[in-house]
Image (spheres, coloured by chain):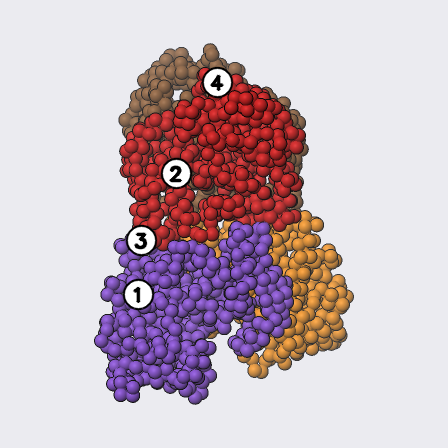
Chain colours: A orange, B purple, C red, D brown
Amino acid sequence: MKHIDIEITAESGLELLTNDEIARLSEHSKDGDHELFKKCVLAVLNSTQVTDEISYHKEQLKNFDVDVVPLNKGVKLKIKNAPTTALVDGFMIQGLKEQVFSVLRDIVFLKQELESNSRIDFNSSNGCTNAIFHILRNAKALRSGTDPNMVVCWGGHAIPEFEYQYTKEVGYRLGLRGFDIITGCGIGAMKGPMKGALIGHSKQRINNARYVGITEPGIIAAESPNPIVNELIVMPDIEKRLEAFVRLGHGFVVFPGGVGTAEEILYILGILLHPDNADTPFPLIFTGPKESAAYFEHIDRFIGDTLGQKAQSKYQIIIDDPVSVARAIQKGIAEVRQYRKEVHDAYHFNWQLEILWDFQEEFIPTHENMSKLNLSADQPLHLLAANLRKAFSGIVSGNVKEQGIQEVSKHGPYQITGDTHIMDQLDALLESFVTQKRMKLNAENYVPCYRVNSASMASKTS
Amino acid sequence: MKHIDIEITAESGLELLTNDEIARLSEHSKDGDHELFKKCVLAVLNSTQVTDEISYHKEQLKNFDVDVVPLNKGVKLKIKNAPTTALVDGFMIQGLKEQVFSVLRDIVFLKQELESNSRIDFNSSNGCTNAIFHILRNAKALRSGTDPNMVVCWGGHAIPEFEYQYTKEVGYRLGLRGFDIITGCGIGAMKGPMKGALIGHSKQRINNARYVGITEPGIIAAESPNPIVNELIVMPDIEKRLEAFVRLGHGFVVFPGGVGTAEEILYILGILLHPDNADTPFPLIFTGPKESAAYFEHIDRFIGDTLGQKAQSKYQIIIDDPVSVARAIQKGIAEVRQYRKEVHDAYHFNWQLEILWDFQEEFIPTHENMSKLNLSADQPLHLLAANLRKAFSGIVSGNVKEQGIQEVSKHGPYQITGDTHIMDQLDALLESFVTQKRMKLNAENYVPCYRVNSASMASKTS
Amino acid sequence: MKHIDIEITAESGLELLTNDEIARLSEHSKDGDHELFKKCVLAVLNSTQVTDEISYHKEQLKNFDVDVVPLNKGVKLKIKNAPTTALVDGFMIQGLKEQVFSVLRDIVFLKQELESNSRIDFNSSNGCTNAIFHILRNAKALRSGTDPNMVVCWGGHAIPEFEYQYTKEVGYRLGLRGFDIITGCGIGAMKGPMKGALIGHSKQRINNARYVGITEPGIIAAESPNPIVNELIVMPDIEKRLEAFVRLGHGFVVFPGGVGTAEEILYILGILLHPDNADTPFPLIFTGPKESAAYFEHIDRFIGDTLGQKAQSKYQIIIDDPVSVARAIQKGIAEVRQYRKEVHDAYHFNWQLEILWDFQEEFIPTHENMSKLNLSADQPLHLLAANLRKAFSGIVSGNVKEQGIQEVSKHGPYQITGDTHIMDQLDALLESFVTQKRMKLNAENYVPCYRVNSASMASKTS
Amino acid sequence: MKHIDIEITAESGLELLTNDEIARLSEHSKDGDHELFKKCVLAVLNSTQVTDEISYHKEQLKNFDVDVVPLNKGVKLKIKNAPTTALVDGFMIQGLKEQVFSVLRDIVFLKQELESNSRIDFNSSNGCTNAIFHILRNAKALRSGTDPNMVVCWGGHAIPEFEYQYTKEVGYRLGLRGFDIITGCGIGAMKGPMKGALIGHSKQRINNARYVGITEPGIIAAESPNPIVNELIVMPDIEKRLEAFVRLGHGFVVFPGGVGTAEEILYILGILLHPDNADTPFPLIFTGPKESAAYFEHIDRFIGDTLGQKAQSKYQIIIDDPVSVARAIQKGIAEVRQYRKEVHDAYHFNWQLEILWDFQEEFIPTHENMSKLNLSADQPLHLLAANLRKAFSGIVSGNVKEQGIQEVSKHGPYQITGDTHIMDQLDALLESFVTQKRMKLNAENYVPCYRVNSASMASKTS
């Protein structure tokens, strides 16, 4: 791969900065967050590449650099050793240029702006929701006066080809019906729905469709946003990212995935089970091709056995029928519109939804935190869901995140303890993931990073 | 496949008709051209289908019907037994709806409007060019005040996958550079460049790109326009269609194909060899993947041996290098722009190009017409090219068009006679097409529909 | 006044012409219609001038000239001795440039295009209506898909200041309610409503409002279109112009004027009295400041006495109350919308309205034609109205049109003969116009160009 | 005048607020700034009224009220006893509605937002400039990527009709050349240029022109913004308002006025005389009809005698020639563009201009502050100009501002002391204002609110 030096000037709302803002931006991009910023920009520029090899990326990083140059009339980025695939005849591809400045906006500019604002904080539930609103508004992702039409698609990153094709087909059917798409902005189930929708929109002559990618710094650097994404938003961490999905979207489709997808499912069920949200319409569809029916069977059984029928009533499972998925979403979103109209809620942000601090605070999966999780049936369902969500989050980390892997190699597998009944179900579900090879990419012989103990056992062993 | 009855109201400029125009339209669509109109509409509605089976299409036609219903405020189409694949939840897909009304506009409305205009005729060279301009203007395909950026892509309909992928790649590189695409609007080399360009445009955030498909009634009915086409134009016959390409386009790319592609190549070389066109810049690139290099080698040798170096100087062959193709087109179109500016010619229509009546008149490949073709070296090069073009046109007909096939089965192969030297080259080229299996789709044992005779032999046999 | 030579290139849809069209245009502008074209262009260019002196205009005409220069890419106008007031720093004011090309379009281009079209003629009632539609469509004055909102304002050219202020005030109230304005495009009651509406639109932040001026060649040359007009349309004669108003408009306001305004009133009443139009909603308001109440009293009395209560029921008189006028129009147009929706008529053109050939044929006011007018009560009301319309039309001509004035000076006043009762009313009305000084501009001692005879007298004198 | 209760929902960027922002907005509008907010809203709603009687306004205020009602999806204003002239058929005129929300944005919302931002302050020179940028950006008044074309027009509020007509004529010539207009947004020389430009823009078919009004709370409440203003901005005080003009505008025209206009002139001369601004192009034209030539003669003489030729070289005086004014501005702005391009300064904000804290700090004209002004020649010219500016500012206050009038009635006239030479000139200039009746509206016998003492006299009397 060849590399080249290039300069680009500001887009994405960064054209209008005060001299002070520019100075702070330039400074800030030089210290603390410089490494993070660099990684993210390189991730964006690599997005036309097919490769996924992180080591290659690391090699590139050594020679790669980005400098924020203050101008009187805005900012300029000086990029050293940009991959030439990001350019056409010496000019950066417009879509990539916009994504690069979205990264600058969210990671560097916004961060320090939020810091200077005494009224914004991430330390309370209300503050957190407000901050998310600020970030989305600053990214111009909120559009007042538009009817609800945003569909969030969740699902696995590394999925087999037939599942990928299925996500494309569902996206196509959504696009034909005029829906915009929001995903986590990587490949797999995050790319398929966008690609399908692109074709559907094109056939319907919709040429201002939105393909929103919401990511987080930790992931964007390792995983390039796909280039269809025409609105890139970087949220600080997974909890804020999940809330952004939930407040911004109007309909939700979940495709098969691994433990991460299970985390997303538990997250949203935990919220929907909160008594205050009992009557809020929230279209939630689990879907996959018929070959993947088993995945949702296991999930559904696990939910039924741990959270009960009430939780199961919150979603609908549709197997191998993209048209029905699109129609169910259409019907659901019509109800969302009707409801928000009645309660005078905004279409552009779901203020009504009650989200507890438990779902917003960053969960750090240390061994201690994991072992202290309360997984007993003796608590409100939405809190049990919240704790199960954390358990899955920890396993994701132990499987694929640098920090988690280190912890596990040092202290052995996480100990997860809870009511026997719940633990049995959890064990079975995780086992099914192992069998379906959904635990880890290319893991022939998966060694679990966790151990599931029933509470009685736990008390005995202690 | 399921079918359904549906009504749609006018688009594509047919919203504003006088009552008389509507009445004539409705009447006219009922007689003479009703069958043709029906076939074309069905072709459009089938375009989301994968099938290419004509027999199936014929079966469908029996139950299918379209009625033009006059309204005070425009026209409505009543469609009986439309394939349900053309609809989404009871509404016709917007792109198809526009294409259906483009067909109505060009086949029914325009035809009778042209008839009523005493100043438009297809019976002279000048009249022909003017009529083409009228059709394009009426279709809003001419845009004044826009820089030249239209690239015509020619090539085979039924090509192997690796050639199709190559046409997509070239289209992608053209799209990244902001070029619009014109093709014959079917599949193969007519779809690939559009599909590639769609992605290129999307990455560059170009959302008003043009994908122009120029077809003719005989072909649209058999071959559905691909749904990316957002401007569909129906020209009366192949000669007018070729002229429309040449007057509308600014750059030209030829991919591998069969005898039809050879016809297109001879057509354009014949025009460029006319002395009046000697200095007109006209970017013309022949290109294909490396596996297809032989195709253009044979073509190039044939041209060199029959029309000489001057003809060879009119094009550039680029093998297996999409980026270079796009750059060559970019450079060539910049010269076109410069030239038209200097001579004060329009950007939207190539008035300068001299096109003789020989290239405009419809050639009907009867055995008599074929045998009378003057294929001797003893004539200006551009006329020899014109006659060779007709020879290829006849072979296309004998291979795949209903009328030609019938003729050949009745009277035996066409007799093509000319100078020994030229006939040898022709024979060799055709032979190479047979060997490369480019003569006919799925033809294991191709039986030639022609016999090539050198002039001396011919005189002997007679 | 200073003059300068200038060249301008095409606008208003003339950018896209075939070489033949350009050639014909250039030729045609040189013969037959050259003088007319010249006069009209000069009228447009003079429109920023305050003067109204025709003699000055004639003086200018001697040195003034316009040439249509054919280009490969459109047309260029070479203007000799253009008044410098039409330019800003060497460039023609955009609004004037557009109006100049509207004149070229309607007077030169369209005329010969219509001639070449065997399906368009002005010699039948239906043909006439179709031709008007063609002219309006070609001028892009028809907009499908837009709700009815066009208000036609009729009234005097040379009116006192307080009447002018009143027309502005009504225009302002219409503009505040989002209505577009159509007038005859000169000064007085034709300018006031546009000027008022401009301010109303500006306050409502409507920046795409339409100010349509419909004129005829005879009048545009003598009377410059006001520069607010952003769509200028030139109809062939007064009858076609009146029909264009009536088919295009949705609401109608009549301000005080002279005999010309009386002609307009009789024209529309004649149409509305036709039995086929009995149920067609047609908002028609007569209005003026309180000082002008007498004008409409006389008109109303005349209508009551000659055409009866049925005719009087077709309009509403509102004195000195601009807000009520605007509200009445608003209410009326809502009914028009409702009605057209029910009968599936277009919003952009009133096809439903029956207009007899009597109202469409050009009436030439010779002494013979005037004396033969049937003004007896013994005929359907709508025909009596048609004939009264012609009587007024003749008087307008005898008062101010060159041809009419010559006729009268040669043969003495027109003889108008009819039933005693009707003639008495006519005499009284005309007398009131004389008293109110509405007969002629600056005419201290008006000498009538007509004599009114009752039928019995007429038979005696003959 | 009639009044009515009405509710309106948010515009001007206030559609997208967090719940917290809405709550603070609603609260804040209830305390501290409620009275101010009320006054300003009433001023806007009265702007279609002709009256200028403050007492009437005060009477209205008693019954008038505005409530900010928080909604989940934005804000709503409940207005009690709005003048009915602000409504059309029950709906508020769009232009007024936008202005009302501009007031809410700048006075209530922005104020408390700025307070919460630790990086914005008005207590340093740099902070002040940054804050002004923030306010303008928040009002969307900064447009990147647009060529310089904003012309600031200064001049008297209460001017004779012939001067008003002249300002209209200049505005018309600026509008014909495509310039946007910025004024103080009241009547007189602040309305005339906008009204003239509106017509010029309309003739040039420019339909997105900007009419920016920059006001301050103290003045908007007493003086309604004219309704042509389509961007209303409220700056905190006169110093910030003057800086906003100077940073936002590209060309400057000064019409005749009174002491206030003299204040503006001294302000800008003081800035331009700063050594750092010596080479910054800054088109500054003083202009008026020939009847007003004396005004600028006196001003020019005063400047020459006190600040010298260098100051005189900063402006150009053009008498009775609107076209020349427009051309001079055009030429000057071309130089501004060229210069900013060269030094890479923004087009949308004049960052380059050095403005000292002396020109930014609020000057409160107490007797002490006025008497302590340093008006000796023994200081840099730009500081002398700054102090003279303050002297004029004080006289404006003593003449027409409530606070100043009270002070003067309590303590007698302000004592202004300085070098004899300068004091003589000042006395002569003020005397000429008295003679020309420019001191105060409707003041037959003006009693000066100041006494001018030469420094020597001053020392004697003390």
> Are discs 2 and 1 both within one chain?
no
* Residue C352 spot, x, y in % from top left: 59, 45
> Is the N terminus of chain B in the top left, top right, bottom left or bottom right quadrant?
bottom right
Helix, strand or loop at label 2? It is helix
Report which residue position mark 3 lands on: C72
The label shown at residue B356 is 1
Above or below residue A386? Residue A430 is below
- Nearer the observer, B169 or B375: B375
Dot 1 and dot 4 within a common chain? no
Which residue was labeled with disc 2? C96
Is circle 3 on the same chain as circle 1? no
**Is the Cβ of the residue at disc 3 closer than 8 Å to that at disc 1?**
no
Within 10 Å of the Cα at label 4, are there few (<14), some (14-19), or many (20+) other Cα atoms?
some
Nearest to the observer: residue D57 or residue A65:
D57
Q: Are marks 3 and 4 on the same chain?
A: no
Amino acid at dot 4: Leu
| Residue underneath mark 4 | D441
For the point 64% across and 37% down, the residue is C331
Residue type highlighted by circle 1: Leu
- Residue at 39% from the left image edge and 47% from the top image edge: C112
Sort mark 3 into few (<14), some (14-19) or many (20+) by Cα contacts within 10 Å.
some
Instruction: State which tag comes first along the sequence, 2 or 3.
Output: 3
